Amino acid sequence: MEVRTGTGDCEGWRKSKGGISIKKKGGAAKDSSDEISIRREEMNKPKTRCLSVALVIGVMAVFGSSVAFAQVHSTGLTVSKSCPTNPVAQGSTIQCSYTITNSGDDQHGVNLTAASETVPCPTPDILGNCGAGAGVPFDVLTMSATNTGCLQGGVIVTALGVSTNLATRSCTGSFDQIVPISCNAAEGTIIDKVEAAGTDADPGIFNGLPVGNFTTNVIHVLGQTCSEGEFCRTPGFWATHVGGGDDTCSQNITQAVIDEVGSLLICGETICSTVDDDASSAVEAMCVAVQGQQERQLARQLTAAALNCIVTNGDADCTGVSIDAVFDACNTICTNNLDADPTNDASLGDCVAKLDCFNNGGVFASGECSTGTCSNDPTQGCTQDDLTNCGAGAECNSLENNCHDAEFADFENVTLPNDLLPDTDPCFEKQGPADSTECKQSKKTDCTVIPPGEADCDTESCADPI
């Protein structure tokens, strides 16, 4: 067994050929085998105290950085982890690396039994307990498409040896980590936790002694304001709320929103009306047979997004809304009829997906749209129709303050026709039902707001910009 030295009761302990001897400060070791049991008992006392001192020292170790190891305990294993130091976006996938090192038994080694990652780990206490709201831990030792396992020379290991060679004493791995989604979160940080457990490989008295370690990280996360104070509805909503029906309280909501700004500029075309067979009609933009033409679908989603932005803050170009960068880039692509532009990382298909996600009140990240998070793992996004990222029996909890749940009455940028009625009128401030009459009629025409169908329209109410 190794010889350890120190001060006071933690002077050290040593195993010799004739038995076990305790070397105390200022005293001499005795080797009589008749006193083994007594000396074992005496040996365990200082060792227990030494391990307790080591644990306290480990708990007190605090490191500060943009990716911080807030707490590190050493009781036979040392765990370290590194994640991106730059701020990361919610819902994005980041790769973190970790190292597990045998820092205790340098004669016999340590056998790993488990290692896991928990994100988020809210308000961890001094022992690393993550508290309420913590994510479901996942195993980081098992190799998968997003997880390397703990490797030595490319091979997964669970036994950490005693050689001074770091490759023998340690194993390293990496895994992909999804940053938790929270639509109304301000820029800040999240804390996660990686921990490892094992047993001492000493074949003698310390055989199977449990050892463990954990470390917590602080990751700087960018804020996401996709639904905080925003309004959104789908193209289907806007296309079927243009009045014209016989239902009680029916009103032309879409025209009222357009009138607040005068017109929309979509794909280089001016939109100012909601009538059929008009190259300037929002109905013709949104009630359209796509027929494999992505530009038509893009114009449809852009029109709905512009209407949503007007309700949100009064700007048809979505300035100041969470979708503003996507809207600007995709509207430019549609105007220029470009398939892809590497400077803004948007193609026609990507644009349609991102705008459609916004119009449905979702968050688009890592190529997927999420309108909620998994009930059993809040780090994973989902929709009511797609629980692929969730475990069995899980539900999809809607994102808080979802813009799709917002009401017109929550915003002051638009005045609807029914808002102007006397307060004694039964339709006063009522939204009114959907009516698909105009939309169905529009689909029967060859008119579209963008070429080539633009030339087939009977009228064009608004002149396009020169």
Image (tube, grey):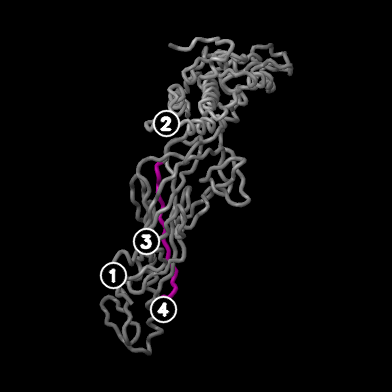
Dominant secondary structure, magenta: strand
Q: Which residue is mark 3?
A: 154
User: Where are the magenta residues, as a range?
Assistant: 203-220
Q: Residues within 10 Å of mark 4 (few under 14, many from 20)?
A: few
Q: Nearer the viewer, mark 4 or mark 1?
A: 4
Q: Quadrant of the C terminus?
A: top left
Residue to which mark 4 is pinned: 205
Distance from label 1 to label 2 (Cα)? Answer: 67 Å
User: Which label sits in the foreground, 1 or 2?
Assistant: 2
Is disc 2 surrounded by few (<14), some (14 to 19) or many (20+) residues within 10 Å? some
Q: Of circles 2 and 3, which is in front?
A: 2
Say which amino acid is labelled 2.
Ala
Q: Residues within 10 Å of mark 3 (few under 14, many from 20)?
A: few
Q: Is residue 44 left or right of residue 12?
A: right
Left or right: residue 170 compared with residue 443? left
Of labels 3 and 4, earlier in sequence is 3
Comes first in the chain, label 4 or label 2: 4
Whichever of labels 4 and 1 marks the residue nearer the N terminus, that label is 1
Image location (x, y in percent) of residue 5: 28, 72
For residue 210: magenta?
yes
